[in-house]
Image (spheres, rainbow, N blue to C red):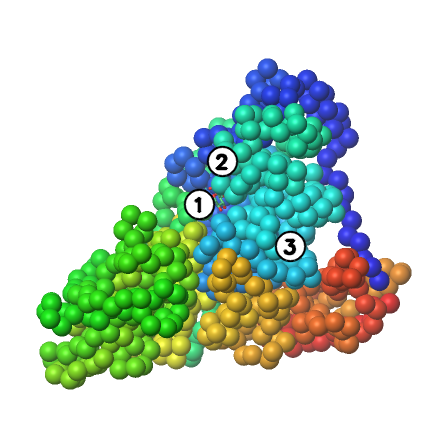
Amino acid sequence: MVFLFTTTPARAGDVESRVDSLLQQMTLNEKVRLLCGHDNRFTYPVPRLGIPQLQMSDGPVGAHNDGPDTAYPSSIALAATWNADLAMQFGESIGSDCRARGDNFILGPAMDMYRVPVCGRNSEYLGEDPYLSGTIAARVVRGIQSKGVAATVKHYAGNEQEDHRGTESDEVDERTLREIYMRQFEIVVRDSHPWAVMAAYNRINGTYCTANHWLLTDVLKNEWGFEGIVMSDWGATHDEVGPANAGLDLEMPGGEHFTPAKLLPLIKNGSIPQAAIDDKVRRLLRVMVTMGFLDRPQKDSSIPLDNPRSVQTALEIARQGTVLLKNEGNLLPLDRTRIKSVVIIGPNADPGVVGCGGSSQTEPFHSVSVVAGVQKLVGKTVNVIYLPLTPEQQLDDLAAHSLYQPISADASAPLQAEFFDNKELQGSPKFIRGDKTIHFDWSAQTPPPAGLDVQHFSARWTTKITPPADGNYTFALGSHEGSRLFIDGEQVIDLWAGHPFRQESITRKLTGGKTYNLRIEFFSGWHECSVRFGWGAARPVLDSHQQEKIASADAAIICVGFNTDTESEGFDRPYALTSNQNDLILSVSHLNPHSIVLINSGGNVAMNSWINHIPALLQAWYPGQEGGTALAEILFGDTNPSGHLPATFEKRFQDSPAYKYYPGKDDKVPYKEGIFVGYRYFDAKNIEPRYPFGYGLSYTTFKFSDLKIKPALPDGQEFTATVRVTNTGDRAGGEVAQFYVGQDNPSLPRPPRWLVGYGKVFLMPGESKVRSVTIDPSSLCYWDTALHHWKVDAGGYQLWAGASSRSLGVKAGFAFP
Ligand code: BGC
């Protein structure tokens, strides 16, 4: 059966007559002036008609522009709460923050898919499942707009990596687009009527999103009934006629293409129809009339800038979004009546890392680090020992340290450097020379030697080194783009991929006086091009004072992860934590068996080297300004963790379905894993993840029972499913009831099961509650590429309920007529 979604119009009847009357009074010049922004975040006013200048605030985790604001936890932490009511509360809070500042639009929520763990903006997004992402975002939008602020859902569509985002094209088939990468936008547009959509930087199947008629007009406006404005991401408009006719309404930040000087002649000569201009202006006016922008000042000075209600919301998201991933021997919660001392160490311990870098970065009025949070909560009863790391111990930027020293000061024994005029070190070298160091930055100003094309060459350096004494030695390599290091023929650092500057280091035990062969290889495929290498005697991870404190404490809390410099908009991050952080975890856990790791990241990281050495692990995402309070409460049991993963955490990056297609080649990113994204892939291929989608531990235990499904409508096309959740432990706690369905005999490849509903439930010990979900054709449909429609097959389906995609204790069959 072909299935048609319906959308109820967002506007009221009298809105249109007011919009028409304003439009009729406007000159063409005034209309065109409205179509691009100025000063980064404003539209132009038309004072004679009372049309105000509109102001935008960046999002999605803080309404920030001028001055500080409440810094909420990262969006992925909000998704990890699996709490739609909390998402609504978040929308209301950030909406109020906007009103306190006079913002008409907020640039959020952001909802591209978590496709690879290393995407620089995963923390701004809502995970790997379109249903979870779409339904959480829908509530955020409702909350924002209930405060008289227009939400801007972004980035439509397919901005799933930051490397090359401004030029790359997602090569993706129609079904995958509809079911995975556009589905969450469809849910939010149909459900909550956001008044703005931001068109993404990237291209889809060759066409820029800002100039993609199919994406913006055929689907978004015509099929989904979107009545608001499409604005471009900042600088994502590349032309006038294409974007104007494709359905882009507002160029931001403005001033380049949609200017009167450029548009008026094109309207005059018919390249851009007058009707297209009127439609854009009508949409803008419709937003203004519906949201009340014409009838009241947008700034509400009665709302405090540092709003205690917003602070409370930020704290609650951090409490409910933190995910307890490991808790061997019930080490957590720490019992403050029994332990006497706790050590806190790690680069992210103090000050805390509130959010990732880039346009979402929010400066809070005040923030609580893990150190401050723990001290405040238990400081009187437990001796809290904070052990700051020295700059050398952090070594996060190896390039800034003395490791990058000449490899050989002896001009008679330089490195042999071979340069090739291709990216694969193929054929005979174009030329050979001797280098003393590897510390090069080649660009248009300082081009690579011998006329090599900066975007298309490779190089290999070989040398021998002889360490002066037995001991540990660190080797550090960094490059933009790919590089790799071999010691005696064994590859020990692998950065062999197209990416902005990245660095890795390894530490090896070497024998003094013995000679080792080094080989460093590099390629460039980009106009920015650099490579650096160095080695030297390794520094001790911990000094003797730190070692002694760690060994004698009752527990050690290790705060690691990324920060605003290392995980950010604009580039993707490494999969691994820096090697000194990995070493820190190993060294601390070796000294203290009660070691707890707290990670700040927007997604999974490489854990293989240390995961079996630590008993407890908390995924803290970026927990916002109140993160330290929430984490302290979780560590000491004042809050029982109830977050669940909104993305699969794989055992190794290589297991990720998109691994072999990422980051793409020649500006094309094949989305060849198709609809099998995240748990859909792991389940279909039967690959064991480290932590599955939907997973999260609690300090109590829950039981799922009595799964029932029965028809809700006489035509049998809608069902109500219910499940009972019981707290079987001895602590109050929250659990997420997750519902998944799968088709018995699908007529085309489908995942074994997919999420169709969820509900958070808080239970006292022994208490039980029933959670329900409506199952209708929208839960069962797939995109039929022959009909270009959603379709539902009649026949048998299975329904599961449980606490994660891999913990589905109860199951029931049903038939769709
Ligand atoms: C980002 C958007 C952001 C905009 C305005 C762009 O670089 O991609 O998400 O809203 O800047 O700051």
- The answer to whether mark 1 is within 8 Å of ligand 1 is yes
Q: Which residue is mark 3?
A: 182
For this orientation, the residue located farthest to the right is 714
* Quarter of the figure that contains the C terminus: bottom right
Q: What residue is rendered at 58% in x and 20% in y?
A: 46
Q: Identify the disc placed on residue 359.
A: 1
Residue 508 point in image, percent of width and height = 24, 78
Q: Which residue is mark 2?
A: 253
Report how many numbered discs are placed on residues in the image. 3
Query: Of label 3 and label 1, which has the lower sequence position?
Result: 3
- Determine whether label 3 and label 1 are within 8 Å by CB: no
Of residue 641 and residue 163, the one placed in the foreground of this image is 163
Residue 643 point in image, percent of width and height = 52, 63
Residue 478 point in image, percent of width and height = 30, 63
Query: Of label 1 and label 2, which has the lower sequence position?
Result: 2
Element assignment for label 1: loop
- The answer to whether mark 2 is within 8 Å of ligand 1 is yes
Per the model, the C-alpha gap separating discs 3 and 2 is: 25 Å
Type of amino acid at the residue the image marks with label 3: Met
Q: What residue is rendered at 40% in x and 34% in y?
A: 66
Query: Of label 3 and label 2, which has the lower sequence position?
Result: 3
